Amino acid sequence: MTDFSTFIGRAWDEHADAPQGVADRLEEGAALVADEGELIQLLNLAHHLHGEHLDSWAQGIELIERLCGAPVFVADGPSGQAARRFMASLHLAGGQPVGLDAFTPSDRARVLALAASTVASRDALRAGGWLRDALDLAQREELPAGDPTHRALAVTGNNIACTLEEKPDRSAAERDLMILAAQTTRRDWAIAGTWLETERAEYRLANTWLQAGDPARAREHAQACLEIIDANGGAAMERFFGWEALGLVERAAGNATGHAQALARAREAFAELDESDKSWCAPSLDKLAA
């Protein structure tokens, strides 16, 4: 019999190619959950599928309500709080009224961040407004470093920036949102994460500014990424992607010497990787060398 870990891992692996099929199977997963933490993972995937892939907000709310029928669901516990955030996010995305005043400031900020992520690829103006509102709320309420809002904003910012970096033709609003999202990731991982998340946020900013057409700003963040890595032991995987980022920047800037130097350093780091890691890093190295 499939256990929950296998079920949720397979669902995430398949969700981008078959979102409706995965969504249709989520109620099967409810029979496998052993605690609230696993149920929250299922609720999160339901929100992601119906919000970001299927644009079926009402159906997402209905599915979340059904998933809350699982025996481990606790209305006043973490699973109940998560369910209310996910449903409020889908209500916002669908243009329905939401009583945000009923939420704590922390939960309200996380609802706004979730809603921003949900519509970022289709409605940058609404997404940008919600993300800014979430940031303003977190700052105004002076949410402490341990508040989960900071991690939520960091993750949301990274997801939005990654999504918009991949769009071939970005509007001005999408460019602005992409930059804001990457800056949010850097700011909030510095609060909620370790040096590792912070340097990866610098990597994200390097790629974002490169896609935004500003190699000079991108270079600053690629170099900051490498500086953080060097100050914390210089792990090969992190060095590889740090030099990849700088190499892409130098190529875009027309600096052949800088590109060649970065490529050489990326190859040095690549040689230190485990064989399993080399297999999925090789396309990045090939792209840098092309």
Image (cartoon, rainbow, N blue to C red):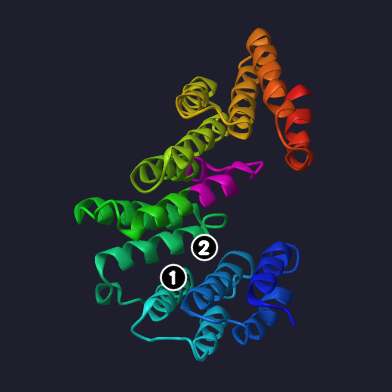
Q: Is residue 112 toward the left or the right of residue 67 in the image?
A: left
- For the C terminus, the image quarter is top right
User: Which stretch appears magenta?
Assistant: 158-175
Q: Amino acid at mark 1?
A: Ser
Q: Residue 87 or 43: which is nearer the viewer?
A: 43
Tell which residue pokes out farthest to the left in this image. 141
Tag 1 residue: 89
Q: Are marks 2 and 1 in contact (CB under 8 Å)?
A: yes
The residue tagged with tag 2: helix, strand or loop? Answer: helix
Position above or below: 266 against 184: above
Please give the name of the residue rendered at 51% of the width and 81% of the height, measured from the top-left corner: 61
Magenta residues, dominant SS class? helix
Figure quadrant of the N terminus: bottom right
Q: Residue furthest top?
A: 257
Q: Which residue carries the number 2 mark?
A: 118
Coordinates of residue 24 in the picture (x, y in percent): 69, 81
Q: Which residue does the image show at 61% across and 16% down from the upper left?
A: 253
Instruction: State the SS at label 1.
Output: helix
Residue 81 — which label? none
Residue 163 among magenta residues: yes
Q: Quadrant of residue 168?
A: top right
Looking at the picture, how far across and down is residue 4, in whole percent? 64, 76
